[in-house]
Amino acid sequence: MQPGALSKALKSGAIWGFIVLELIFFSVAGSYMSLSDTAFMDWENMLLLLKQSAPIGIIAMGMTIVMVNGNIDLSVGATYAIAAIVLLDSMTWPIFAGLGDWVIPVAWLLALTVGTALGALNGLIVWKTGVDAFIVTLGSMLGYRGIVFMFNGENPTSHLNWTLVDLAEAEFLGLATASWFLLAVTGVVWFLMTRTVHGRNAYAIGDNRDAAVNAGIRVGPHMMINFAIIGFLAALSAVVFYSESGSVNPNDGQLYELWVITAVVLGGTKITGGAGSVIGTFGGVIAIQLLRKGLGHIGADTSTVNLVIGLILIAVLFLDRQLNVKGKEELKV
Amino acid sequence: MTDAKPILRLDGIVKTFPGVRALDGVSFSVMPGEVHALMGENGAGKSTLMKVLGGIHQPDEGAIYMGDDRVVMAGPLEAKAKGIVFIHQELSLAEELSVAENIYLGELPRKSFGRVDWTTLTDKTNAILKKLNVGFDANTLVGDLSIANQQMVEIARALTVDAKAVIFDEPTASLTDAEKSVLFDVISDLQADGVGIIYISHRMEEIFKITDRITVLRDGQYQGTVNTRETNEESVTQLMIGRKLDLTRNASHHEIGDVALEVRNLSCGKLYKDISFEVRRGEVVGFYGLVGAGRTEIAETLFGLRDPSAGQIFLDGQEVRISSPADAITRGISLVPEDRKGQGLVLGMNCRDNMTLPQVDDLKAGPFVAEGAEIAIFDQYRDQLDIRTPSWRQQVGNLSGGNQQKIVIGKWLSMHPSLLIVDEPTRGIDVGSKSEIHKLLRALAAKGYAVMVISSEMPEVLHVSDRIVAMYSGRIMRTFTSDEVTEDNLIQAISGIKADQAA
């Protein structure tokens, strides 16, 4: 066994151990404290959980790429809201009136294009100005949200297309449409990050940017592509969710960036970049959703849920630091 | 070899940085199949010359030729494309990636859909690793390798390109003897293929073992090129140091007092091991060694920035545990850090505020900072240290290096320390101010301070120290008194030669 192998094994497996712990805890606690009769680990309940994980989960896959790359994107919640508005509003535009149900793919395409473009814009600014991604996307988070409010003020944007709702509510092999999208995105991003040159370069850039530059990797364009991908996935998340709900409030998607980052970090991605895995992120998404659902199951309210998740996040990062052998050669603060 | 044309030639290279003439008309050439050593003290201009060659710096004057063609190295990529390969002392590897991915970074073989061709990648890498005879394979994570093995990965990287010239910068600093001999085999293979090798090292033994010619730089100036077979260690050392230095250093003979600091068998993980020394009041103890020898880490431990893994520290005979810089300051220890701008000063703040930073909490009048008291302290040390600034309002960032350093020293003197640790006291300071700082350090010792000076410049250590501790890769090799030290035995001690002579 190589030095550090134990801490590595602990780290990579930790999220799944945590999920098992949650399941046991909520099952046991639920049998005493729950208001409902159904067991927590009910199959239907677990399927619903997977479906409810989709909006955060799909974006979290994009965030994994961007964070492994050494950047961060705070604007995903706002991008999500814009894409939702484009999706619902475009279906009512007169120019598409003659399309019938063909308006659905057109609206999807429009929403996804807008999301990709907004993401690419973030990437372009990060690349060309050299300003830190945190600052750039903090700005675009405010800016994009501003656009959302400019569009319809405080009012919700609604449109129900029943064909679309049927599609979104359909199930295939027992899984909801949203769940399939989450699984598919996870698979594709996993393939991208582990099997392709682009994905491996993302790790290299996040790990040691100078080495990547010296090796001839075009770091700027590479980062821009990753921002475009996360923009696309934020829009995809909106498309999947709002196809079913049919109504978007201007505040929708707020704090999504923080939930997404929490899931990614819980899943083991380093905030400084260079390390992280898509499977770990998937675990992080499930763990958070379990926690929210489980705490609800035993009767806790939303504020308690937030407090607990916050504490767990800090505890996890502290443990990670303790397990990290290299931490010991750092200067004390 | 005399008829052959150099594969690479640098001609009359001049490079100036603000205030410093880093390279002053340096010429250097490498023949195909030759190992050419580049030697000189820290700061002699070796790395600047190599940065010019690597396209990181553009020369102000002079030219680079490859074969008969004049070339311009616009950047690192261009140098690499022209077959100039650097093996850096500081590793530039991505630790979370595999050995294979690091070796082919930026050039990963592809299949359809942008997929990495892992089979080709692994096979190519393993072929190279086999040649290097290392004990790890293509899929090992670089972060799991020892520093020495990471160095081998860097070397492996050089073998993937069609190299015309390979530059080894202190390649053996972290290698064991077995690994060294592998490295030397690799070098002789490269030689046999007609590649020119530039070999930068402080270690005479290696230089005389593997090189054909030696070029020496001093203070940015070309000192000469000699055939290795026709010279010896002594004359090369002579070239590196120049004229016999004026070693009548401390005219200020003063009383050496009690032991202020004693360190016994101090260790800190892999950074340094088994360190014992003492510093008396009125004495300057110099710590000399190559970068990475562990000197700064000892200073950081004494200042409470690192916890030692073993050993004891005594201040005035009392064993102490120094838990934090605040603790160190209360106990009378001060550290003037290596990186003045990064660690020693708040550049955007004015002179006065920088000077009183550690004690501003004690200078209060009610809830407010007592500005009058601050100015009084500033005035006192401005006069004592001869700090040249128009007013205390001047931003420290606008002062010269020498005056900045005096502000840092003044800051700590105003805390009335019993032990003053100065890490690289004159880095980036012009020659005139250097000697002022040196005089200042001597004067402080004369006043009864115990002073530790860490320096990578030999003349400086020789000039200011009463005793010199020579360190090599985390260990003390020998402690010299000012009577017994010579440039020769000092260079040998810090190069790891004659380890048996430990005092």
Image (tube, coloured by chain):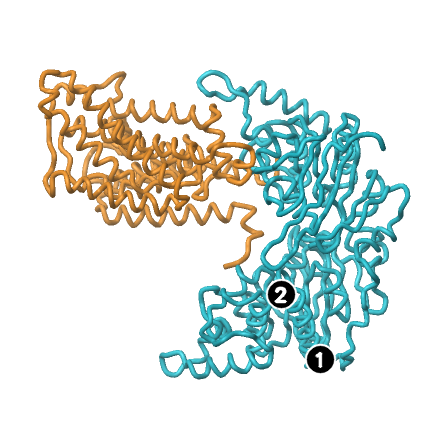
Chain colours: A orange, B cyan
Q: Residues within 10 Å of mark 2 (few under 14, many from 20)?
A: many
Q: In front: mark 2 or mark 1?
A: 1
> Which of the image's four quarters has the C terminus of chain B?
bottom right
Same chain for labels 2 and 1? Say yes or no: yes
> Residue placed at 11% from the left, 39% from the top?
A152
> Which of the image's four quarters has the N terminus of chain B?
top right
Name the disc covering residue A281, or none. none
The image quadrant of residue B339 is bottom right
A40 or B495, nearer to the observer: B495
| Residue farthest toward the right in the current orientation of the protein | B230
Residue denoted by label 1:
B446
> Residue placed at 74% from the left, 30% from the top?
B195
SS assignment at label 1: helix
SS assignment at label 2: helix
> In the figure, is residue A117 to the left or right of B484?
left
Where does residue B179 sit, x and y in percent of width and height? 75, 37
The image quadrant of residue B183 is top right
Name the disc covering residue B302, or none. 2
Name which residue type carries label 1. Ala
Q: Chain of mark 2?
A: B
The image quadrant of residue A242 is top left
> Residue placed at 86% from the left, 57% from the top?
B501
Instruction: Give the Cα separation between the discs numbered 2 and 1.
Output: 23 Å
Where does residue A135 sit, x and y in percent of width and height? 35, 47
> In the figure, is residue B134 to the left or right of B407?
right
- Verify CB contact (< 8 Å) between mark 2 and mark 1: no
Q: Is residue B66 visible?
A: yes
